[in-house]
Amino acid sequence: MTKEILIWFANWTKIKYKLHIGENINFYFKERDIWWSSLGANVGFEQNGKNENFERPVLVLKKFNKDMLWALPITSQYKTGEYYYNFEYAGKKYSVILSQLRTISSKRLSRKIRRLPEGDFNKIRELIKRWL
């Protein structure tokens, strides 16, 4: 393992610890919301977070309770294929990475960005339902 990778994981471990023991801020989040979320330094081909807080936008697909949700990572790189759902906002193209559906703690959420239009959200739910 290279030194850069070790430093990267060490930095994520520090952030993860702060998220876990941090004050239990109960954000009010709903399905269809898009939030910045600390996803971390993940293994292999899992979608990583960016910047010093290892964040990336995620779509709240399902809220189980105030503490747990299903999240789908979003990228600003336009992707094609059956495992992506593309949408536009403010003239920019984005892709929801359907294959990266994961359960996360609401402690990972940091800032609400906006809500996805209901039509797009319903299409994403139908695509996920087909796989399940």
Image: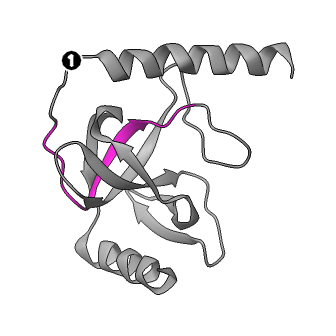
Estimate the x, y position of residue 129 in percent, counting from the top left: 41, 82
Q: Which residues are magenta?
A: 27-40
Q: Quadrant of residue 33?
A: bottom left
According to the image, label 1 marks what residue? Answer: 23
Residue drawn 16% across and 36% down?
27
Residue 74 position within the rendered picture, expressed as x and y whole percent measured from the top left = 49, 53
**How many numbered discs sit on the rendered protein?**
1
Q: Nearer the viewer, residue 38 or 10?
A: 10
- Who's the residue at 50% across and 59% down the image? 94
**Which SS class for mark 1?**
loop
Q: Nearer the viewer, residue 100 or 65?
A: 65
Q: Is residue 56 left or right of residue 59?
A: right
Q: Examine the rendered structure and indicate whether residue 97 appears above or below residue 18.
A: below
Is residue 36 located in the magenta-colored stretch of the structure? yes
Q: Is residue 45 above or below residue 11?
A: below
> Is 48 displayed left or right of 117 in the figure?
right
**Residue 14 vertical position relative to residue 129 in the rendered view, above or below:** above
Mark 1 belongs to which amino acid?
A: Glu
